[in-house]
Image (cartoon, rainbow, N blue to C red):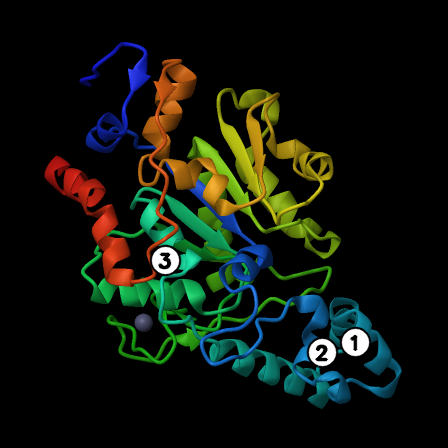
Amino acid sequence: MSTSSDHEVSVKEEIDNVFMGKPHVLLLGAGASKAALPSRDKNGKPVPILRELATELNIFKYFPDDLVELSKSDFESAYSQLFNRGKSKSLDEVDNIVSNYFSNLELPEETNLYDLLHLCLREKDVIATFNWDPFLMQSRIRLCKLGVTKFPKLFFLHGNVRVGYCSKDKVSGLVGVRCKTCGSFFQPSKLLYPVENKNYQDGDFIQREWKAIRYFLKGCFMLTIFGYSAPKTDHEAIKLLKEGWGDVEERNMEQTDIINRPGSDHETLRQTWDNFIHTHHYDIYDSFYESFLAKHPRRSGEAYWNQYYEAKFISDNPVPTYITDLRKLVDWFKPLLDVEKNKQ
Ligand SMILES: [Zn+2]
C-alpha cells in the first residue's frame, strides 16, 4: 500500500487502495425510509409508519368492532390480536390493502438516500432491511439503467412487496418476473407483520434471508443500524441477529454504528444495542450523512482498517449532498468504481 505519510491517509489514497474483503452490514428499519422520504413519495402519497397505518390507509373499518379504536391508536397491537383470531375476511382485506399500498409507492425522480446506500457499499457488503416498501429495489433498477453493475447483497428480513421467490429453485427475483430455471413467476414474498411470534422458519424465502444475514453478521467488520429501534414485537428478530453477531466479548475490533433521527436519546440507543457493542467500539449519529459509511463511501472497510488497526489519521471523503441528478451522482462515484474495476 502506498502512502504519502506513515501516519496519514489522504482522500486519494483512500480511493486508490482497495483491500478489505470482509463485509460491512447495513441493517435498515422504518426510520431509513422516513429519512429517505420524510413526507411523501413521488405521487404525493404518504409513507406511513406502521403505528399509523390504520388511519393513514383508512383500514380501521376492516377491523372487527372491538378492535377499531385500538387499530387507530396502535395498528401493531390491533393487527396482532386480529392475526391471533385466525384466518378471516378482515385479515385478508387488511393484508391486501397494505400490500397494494406499499407496492405502489414510488421514489421521486431526484437522487434519494436509497441511491446513496447502494452506491456507498460494494459487492462484498450487505444491506438487510425490515422494510416492505419498494424503494431499495426501485433505486437498484434505476442505477442499473445508468450502468452501475456491482451492488451490495440485499436481504429482506420481513419480506418485501417487490421481491418474490421460487420455492422450487430457491431463488428470489422481482415479482412479475419469471424464474430463469423453471419459467414460473416468482411468488410474492409474505410480508411479516408486527405480531409477536413471526414465522422466521418458514422453510422458504424468509428463512433463507435470515440464514444469510446471520452468516454475514458473523464475518462483518462493521454493523450499521439505520432507523431500526428494535421494537418489543421483534424480540425474535433481535434474538436471531444476536445469534449471528455472537458474543460481544468474542468480537474484538468490530465497530457498531447506529444512525437514528435527529434529537434521539443516545444513551437509550446504546442500551438498546448493548448486546451488539464491544466495549467502546460504537458511534451514534443523528443522520446518515454524519456516519462513517457516508464519510468513507465504498471504502468503509479500508478506512476502518487504517484508523483502528494501523492507528492512522484518515481524511474524510464525504458523499455529496448537493447533487440532485442521479447520473451526476453516479459520476461522482466513478473514480471509486474505476479503481475497483482495475483491481479485478
Ligand atoms: Zn424456479
Q: Position of residue 14 (x, y in %)?
A: 27, 29
Q: Residue at x 54, y 46 (%)?
A: 287
Answer left or right for 48 relative to 13: right
Label 3 sits on what residue type?
A: Asp
Answer left or right for 43 relative to 63: left
Vertical side of 319 occupied by 98: above or below: below
Q: Which residue is mark 2?
A: 54
Quadrant for the N terminus, please.
top left
Q: Position of residue 83 (x, y in %)?
A: 73, 74
User: What secondary structure is marked by label 1?
Assistant: helix
How many numbered discs sit on the rendered protein?
Answer: 3
Q: Which mark is residue 47?
A: none
Vertical side of 103 occupied by 274: above or below: above
Q: Position of residue 86 (x, y in %)?
A: 74, 78
- For label 3, the crowd category at 10 Å Cα-Cα, with few meaning under 14, some 14 to 19 and many 20 or more, is many
Label 2 sits on what residue type?
A: Ala
Q: Which residue is mark 1?
A: 71
Vertical side of 12 occupied by 244: above or below: below
Q: Which residue is mark 3?
A: 115
- For label 1, the crowd category at 10 Å Cα-Cα, with few meaning under 14, some 14 to 19 and many 20 or more, is many
Q: Position of residue 175 (x, y in %)?
A: 39, 76
